[in-house]
Amino acid sequence: MGIFISILTFNRIIFRNKKSQTIKDNNNILFMGCCSSRKNNDYVLIIGSPGSGKTNLYKKLNQNINDQFSFVDIPAMDLEESIENREKFINDFQNICENKINKKSQIVSIVVSVKFERTDLMKRSLLSVIKYFHRYLDLIIIAITHFDQSEDQDEDKNNLKQQLKFLLKNNEDRIVFSQNSNQNDNQMCENLLKIIENVKQNKQEPFTLKDTIFEKIDETQQQNHLRDLFQEFNNQQ
Ligand SMILES: Nc1nc2c(ncn2[C@@H]2O[C@H](COP(=O)(O)OP(=O)(O)OP(=O)(O)O)[C@@H](O)[C@H]2O)c(=O)[nH]1
Ligand SMILES: [Mg+2]
């Protein structure tokens, strides 16, 4: 079993190596995510499943929120679809974050967008994203998009807050509702802004890729890992 897991890890490292080589060979043309060109160094990532309303939300935030935060529209997260998608997302995400996290700037919050639909489907979509950030649950804010499709907004708001708060350490205050109607945009953005400020103030530790599946394995680590693997393999012979 130990060997099996090790071989899987080994394959993953090789695969990732190949991928980064290809990217390098392509004259460093990397997808960097869409990011507001503000001077502010506090970044807020917008992540979510394909078609969950990330770009729409990103545009609303840029129109309505002044210079406090810089938003980043992260490519769709669909890590279970195929190994190619997964590896591509990991590479892109590493590059985006490496670019954003430095001495002067930090990622203060992660907004996870989810489309308003059947609650079990929303839970599944949210879990498929949030599970990769379990170390940073305190930074997560849920944005429920397409809320114009709700027939009873007050009731749905209450129900969803109760049903989804388990993803936010029971803090239902970190859920916002977004819809296609200009008159509500300002209110929604102001609301979200207050939540982001709160999250930033209560932040325990800075966001890094360490101990997430997005952590970059450095060359020495890879070499050591390979050496250990071969040694283990030879000992079995
Ligand atoms: N009715 C309604 N439509 C929305 C809302 N938000 C987004 N849409 C529509 O849903 C579709 C997908 O929205 P996007 O913002 O492009 O979603 P995305 O998550 O960026 O999509 P990908 O980047 O492809 O993963 C678009 O046609 C939007 O116009 C909303 O709140 N209400
Ligand atoms: Mg998009």
Image (spheres, helix red, strand yellow):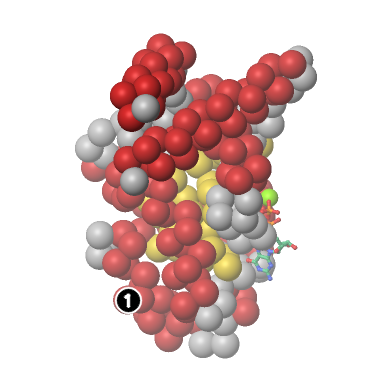
Instruction: Assess disc 1: are there few (<14), some (14-19) or many (≥20) residues with their C-alpha within 10 Å of its C-alpha.
Output: few
Horizontal relation, residue 191 to residue 55: left or right: left
Residue sitting at the far top: 220
Q: Nearer the viewer, residue 56 or 209?
A: 209
Horizontal relation, residue 215 to residue 185: left or right: left
Tell me residue 89's x, y (percent): 59, 40
Disc 1 residue type (three-letter): Gln
Horizontal relation, residue 44 to residue 146: left or right: left
Inspect this view and state whether residue 225 appears: no
What's the residue at 62%, 55% (across, down)? Answer: 81
Within the image, what quadrant is residue 231 found in?
Answer: top left
Tell me residue 135's x, y (percent): 30, 44
What's the residue at 52%, 34% (across, down)? Answer: 11
How many dots with numbers? 1
Inspect this view and state whether residue 79 appears: yes
Quarter of the rendered image showing ligand 1: bottom right
Picture layout, residue 205 above or below residue 165 = above
What's the residue at 47%, 39% (across, down)? Answer: 8
Instruction: List the residue tagged with mark 1.
Output: 162
Picture layout, residue 212 above or below residue 133 = above
Q: Nearer the viewer, residue 215 or 50?
A: 215
Callout 1: helix, strand or loop?
helix
The C terminus sits in image quarter: top left
Tell me residue 149's x, y (percent): 62, 79
Residue sitting at the far front: 237
Q: Nearer the viewer, residue 111 or 198?
A: 111
Picture layout, residue 26 above or below residue 195 = above
What's the residue at 59%, 31% (across, down)? Answer: 15
